Amino acid sequence: MSWTVRSVTLADTHTVARHRLPDLPPDHAAVRAYAEWLPSALERGLYLGWLAESGGGVVGGAGLILLEWGPTRDDPQPWRGRVVNVWTHPSWRRQGIARQLLMRVLAAAAARGVSVLGLSTTPAGRPLYGALGFEAATAEMVRRSSR
């Protein structure tokens, strides 16, 4: 099975919101709120996202939220990144889709000089994130690229 990857557009806000909250009904207030927030974040360049498609349907997705964090003593870069909305359709899992999407996220962060990325994960996602350089940090995982 093959797929292609494309950037998220304004037309994809409901799809991305469903990836964000897949366990909630599509009309849930939290899903609607995320879908309403997303267009402005896309237009301001604060949300970057990618979707994997096959046969005209979405089979996976991943996104990056850019956060103006401010410089710290360990990182003079004022931006941090938050990896979000990593989702793969159950019948498409373990085929490299999430990895390919995450590589797009990492490349976009690097292109913007963002060296610290955080995310929340499930036990199933930990091996993939660990293989990409993320480390456990309390309840989250963090990836720090070399300077």
Image: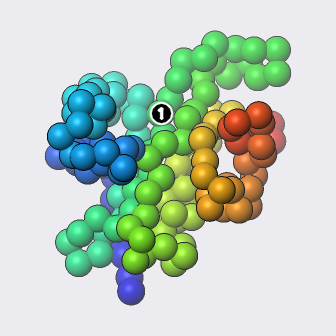
Which color scheme is applied? Answer: rainbow
Q: Position of residue 38 (x, y in %)?
A: 29, 32
Horizontal side, residue 42 vs residue 80: left or right: left
Residue 94 location, quadrant:
bottom right
Q: Position of residue 120 (x, y in %)?
A: 60, 41
Q: Point out the image quarter for the N terminus.
A: bottom left
Q: Quick check: 147 above or below 40?
A: below
The residue shown at (35%, 58%) is 51
Q: Position of residue 131 (x, y in %)?
A: 73, 61
Q: Quick check: 44 above or below 90?
A: above
Tell me the SS state at disc 1: strand
For the residue pair 61 and 139, the one nearer the viewer reads as 139
Residue 111 location, quadrant:
top right
Residue 83 location, quadrant:
top right
Horizontal side, residue 22 vs residue 111: left or right: left
The residue shown at (64%, 13%) is 70
| Amino acid type assigned to the residue bearing label 1 in the image | Ile
**Is residue 145 in sight in this rendering?**
no
Horizontal side, residue 95 vs residue 90: left or right: right
Please name the residue that numbered disc 1 is placed on.
65
Horizontal side, residue 83 vs residue 142: left or right: left
